[in-house]
Amino acid sequence: MKNKILSIALTTALCLTLCACGSKEEASNTVVENESVAKTEAVVEVKTSVENTEAPIETVEQTTEEAQTVVETETATAESTEPVEEVVPTWFDEHGLTLTPAGAFSFNTMSAVADDNGNPKDYELFNVPANMTIDVVTEGVEEGYKNIIYTVFYDKSNMPEGTGWLWNSTLIDGYTGVTLDIGDTYVDSETTTAINEHYQTITFDGVDYNVGATQSTEYGETTLTQVFTVKVPVDYDGVTLAIGYSDATSYMSEVEAETYDKDYLFDKETCYFGIN
């Protein structure tokens, strides 16, 4: 009886033990599963946090780009509102003219004889070799002014025998196209000597320039030398000496001309000399 009771007791104890062990395994499994869930949740939370931190980065980049766009727009607006200085074209530029470098040059012009009234009549075209020097002098000149000196040497050896010749040598204002008047001269058989300057006011782009000019000439048998001296303000570079073709018709027209036009008087061969 005791053995049976002991056997029953041992069986009961073993059962309890087994039941207890089973409870531990279940508890252990539950803990592991819970830990897995916790780890899974942690991973989800971490991933979610990382994803959430990426969104602000995109927002920052967008905000930076928007700020740059605003700055560029404001800069463009500021630049577009800045006043643009208007450049007033000169008469020289409007006619598409260019300056001839100083030195040797040549041009064709008309020889002439006198008609019954003593006026020139065209005879024959010939070529004139020439040479130009340009000097700018400030020493000994009134303060605020400078002298521009054009010296032109002509070789007339190609001129037909028994004729005279016609050529254009005219000072003009390159800013406006107005001819510059020459001062009084004394003329004899071999020279034309300047006596005084003739002043006139040139107005361009709202600025007045007081300009004075003289001209002297020395005649040789087959040569001729002209010297033009132009007194101008130091900030004025518009004076231009035009040299080239002329004929009887042009000569008579030039007498009354006040403004030269490329297609009117200078439609043949003309060289323009200046310092600008």
Image (cartoon, helix red, strand yellow):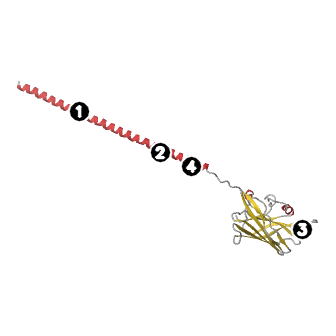
What x and y, as percent, mark residue 188? 85, 74
Q: Which residue is mark 3?
A: 113
The disc at residue 245 is: none
> Which is more foreground, mark 4 or mark 3?
4
At a point 23% along the width and 33% down the height, the residue shown is: 27
> Which is more foreground, mark 2 or mark 1?
2
Q: Which residue is mark 1?
A: 27
Residue flagged by tag 4: what amino acid is it? Thr
What kind of element bears circle 1?
Answer: helix
Image quadrant holding the N terminus, namely top left
Residue flagged by tag 2: what amino acid is it? Glu
Question: What is the CA distance from the residue labelled 2 to the residue labelled 1?
Answer: 51 Å
Q: Which residue is mark 2?
A: 61
Which numbered disc, 4 or 3, marks the residue that appears first in the sequence?
Answer: 4
Count residues near mark 2 (Cα–Cα under 10 Å), then give few for <14, some for 14-19, many for 20+: few
Question: What is the CA distance from the residue labelled 2 to the residue labelled 4?
Answer: 21 Å
Q: Between residue 89 and residue 35, name the one nearer to us.
A: 89
Q: Is residue 154 left or right of residue 12?
A: right
Question: What is the CA distance from the residue labelled 4 to the residue labelled 3?
Answer: 71 Å
The disc at residue 75 is: 4
Count residues near mark 1 (Cα–Cα under 10 Å), then give few for <14, some for 14-19, many for 20+: few
> Which is more foreground, mark 1 or mark 4?
4
What kind of element bears circle 3?
Answer: strand
